[in-house]
Image (cartoon, grey):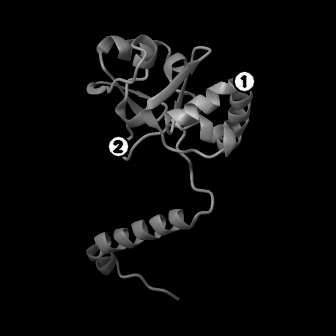
Amino acid sequence: MVTINLKTVTKNMPCILMVAFLLGVFATMTNAESPKKKINSDVFGVAIKGYDTVAYFTERHAVKGKSEFAYNWSDAKWYFASAEHRDLFEADPERYAPRYGGYCAASMASTGKMFDINPEAFKIIDGKLYLYYDNRYGNQFAAKSEKNIKKADENWMKVNK
């Protein structure tokens, strides 16, 4: 039989909470199927390295967003260069959000894995934004876009089951 002294438990509560926290962290680290982030975001939750996803469509080049024009969507913070861009995104995020959560589209097509991107490496194909690790992969992806998009879509569905 185990007896619990409430005075000892209360006095040692911070220590007990720390042990429980560390056990939770350890359990998460050893879990074979750790959850994947659906949006490519940094440790602060900022999507696609803080670049303005609307600017790819309106400016036709990569533009760094500003935290003052942030919008939360799909468990990530999206930064925009202007309030106008933020409002456009807010009205129709699916239109402006990059495919595959902002992970490298070429990697999604070839390996089915979520690889980081260079926000300067992008293509708009059939009105959709695709980001890449670098422009070489973007050019290869775009050269056979129909086939690659089909494969990347299939792989993205598997990754997000």
Looking at the image, tell me whether mark 2 or mark 1 is earlier in sequence order: 2
Q: Secondary structure at mark 1?
A: helix
CA distance for labels 2 and 1: 34 Å
The image quarter in which residue 58 lies: top left
Residue lying at 48% horizontally and 39% vertically, measured from the top left: 117
In this rendered view, identify the residue nearer to me: 89 or 133: 133
- Mark 1 residue crowding within 10 angstroms, few (<14) / some (14–19) / many (20+): few
Q: Is residue 16 visible?
A: yes
Residue lying at 35% horizontally and 32% vertically, measured from the top left: 50
Question: Whole-percent x and y of residue 84?
Answer: 33, 10
In this rendered view, identify the residue nearer to me: 90 or 122: 122
Q: Is residue 47 visible?
A: no
Residue tagged 1? 146
In the figure, is residue 61 to the left or right of 99? Answer: left
- Identity of the amino acid at label 1? Glu
Question: Whole-percent x and y of residue 37?
Answer: 52, 43
Residue tagged 2? 44
- Identity of the amino acid at label 2? Phe
Residue 39 position (above or below residue 52): below
Question: Whole-percent x and y of residue 61?
Answer: 40, 20
The image quarter in which residue 56 lies: top left
In the figure, is residue 52 to the left or right of 10? Answer: right
Label pair 2/1, CB-CB below 8 angstroms: no
Residue lying at 52% horizontally and 62% vertically, measured from the top left: 28
Closer to the eye: label 2 or 1: 1
Q: Secondary structure at mark 2?
A: loop
Residue 103 position (above or below residue 32): above
